[in-house]
Amino acid sequence: VAETMAAAYVSEIPGLEQLGGQSWANAWAFVLLILVLLFRPQGIMGERVTDRA
């Protein structure tokens, strides 16, 4: 769902029409995955784990 939404959203931005559509859909899915892993390394629904010494 996010892949399709990103491709459709980017194709509506003036000046970035060439980066939208199905040919770029996989690239936007990987960009979204990398952003999630950068900002939430434990996952979207993951919980924080504390180390007990």
Image (cartoon, helix red, strand yellow):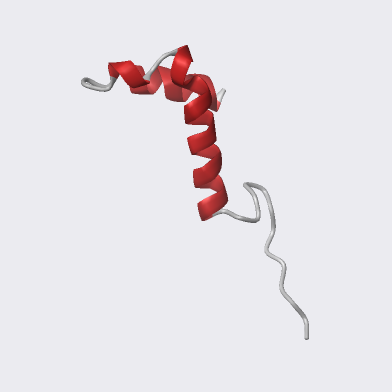
Name of the residue lying farthest toward the bottom: 53
Q: How many marks?
A: 0
Q: Nearer the viewer, residue 17 or 51?
A: 17
**Image-quadrant location for residue 49:** bottom right
Residue at the (67%, 48%) spot, across then down = 45
Residue 33's spot in the image, x, y percent?
A: 56, 39
Locate the C terminus by quadrant. bottom right
**Image-quadrant location for residue 1:** top right
Residue at the (46%, 15%) spot, across then down = 23
Query: Looking at the image, is 30 positioned above or below residue 34?
Result: above
Q: Is residue 12 visible?
A: no
In this rendering, position of residue 12 left or right of residue 21: left
Q: Is residue 30 visible?
A: yes
Query: Looking at the image, is 51 positioned above or below residue 36?
Result: below
Residue at the (41%, 17%) spot, across then down = 8
Q: Nearer the viewer, residue 36 or 30?
A: 30
Residue 36's spot in the image, x, y percent?
A: 54, 46
In this rendering, position of residue 14 left or right of residue 41: left
Name of the residue lying farthest toward the top: 22
Residue 7's spot in the image, x, y percent?
A: 43, 20
In this rendering, position of residue 49 left or right of residue 15: right
Residue at the (48%, 37%) spot, across then down = 31
Name of the residue lying farthest toward the right: 53
